[in-house]
Image: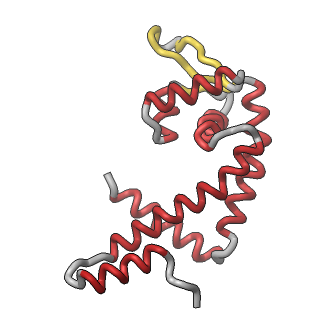
């Protein structure tokens, strides 16, 4: 049997010290937070191997998934990547300085802009996404397919009930 993780140890301590408090949710959320940090550490080397930060990869991947001509408004990018508008602006500035994206006038909104992958950005994301997908598959390989499907379903249900 494996050793209890941090969330289990913390929950056990709370149950001992304050048995009247229901700490089940605390244990689950603690475990999700720990897993998020662990996964991020495992994902980052693939991004770095391609000269990217995780958030920059997200922007390029979001534009790529949009399909040709690989353009979105900054608002659509910001909503798809769950960033603040200020954080998105800084990311776009860095990607534009590296000629991976360009900003264009939005023909539908004279005050707006569109963000578009450049040919260099398209080439980079098409190369980087292959080892990224393989890395994510590797990270979940310890779970059988049925468990992965159940986890995916449960996480989707949890996301659907949160504001």
Colour scheme in the image?
A: secondary structure
- Residue 66 visible to an observer of this rendering: no
Give the residue drawn at x 44%, y 29%. 85
Farthest residue in the left direction?
20
Q: Quadrant of residue 146?
A: bottom right
Give the farthest residue toward the bottom: 1
Q: Is residue 38 visible?
A: yes
Locate the N terminus by quadrant: bottom right
Question: With respect to residue 56, does 149 lie above or below?
Answer: below
**In the drawing, does residue 161 fall left or right of residue 54?**
left
In the image, is residue 87 above or below residue 12?
above
Seen at 44% across and 10% down, the residue is: 111
Residue 57: % across, % down: 65, 40
Q: Which percent across, then down, holds residue 103?
A: 60, 17
71 relative to 59, above or below:
above
Is 143 situated above or below 83?
below
Q: Dividing the picture into quarters, in which one does residue 137 lie?
A: bottom right
Q: Which residue does the image show at 58% across and 40% down from the upper left?
A: 55
Left or right: 51, with 57 as reference point: right
């Amino acid at each position: 049997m494996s050793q209890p993780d941090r969330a289990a140890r913390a929950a056990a301590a709370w149950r001992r010290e304050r048995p009247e408090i229901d700490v089940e949710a605390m244990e689950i959320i603690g475990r999700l937070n720990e897993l998020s940090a662990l996964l991020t550490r495992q994902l980052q080397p693939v991004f770095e191997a391609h000269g990217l930060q995780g958030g920059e990869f997200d922007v390029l991947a979001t534009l790529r998934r949009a399909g040709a001509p690989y353009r979105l408004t900054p608002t659509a990018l910001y909503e798809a990547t769950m960033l603040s508008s200020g954080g998105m602006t800084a990311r776009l500035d860095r990607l534009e300085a590296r000629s991976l994206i360009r900003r264009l006038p939005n023909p539908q909104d004279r005050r707006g802009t569109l963000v578009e992958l450049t040919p260099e950005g398209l080439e980079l994301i098409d190369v980087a996404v292959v080892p990224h997908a393989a890395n994510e598959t590797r990270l979940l390989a310890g779970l059988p397919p049925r468990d992965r499907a159940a986890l995916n379903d449960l996480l989707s249900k949890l996301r659907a009930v949160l504001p």
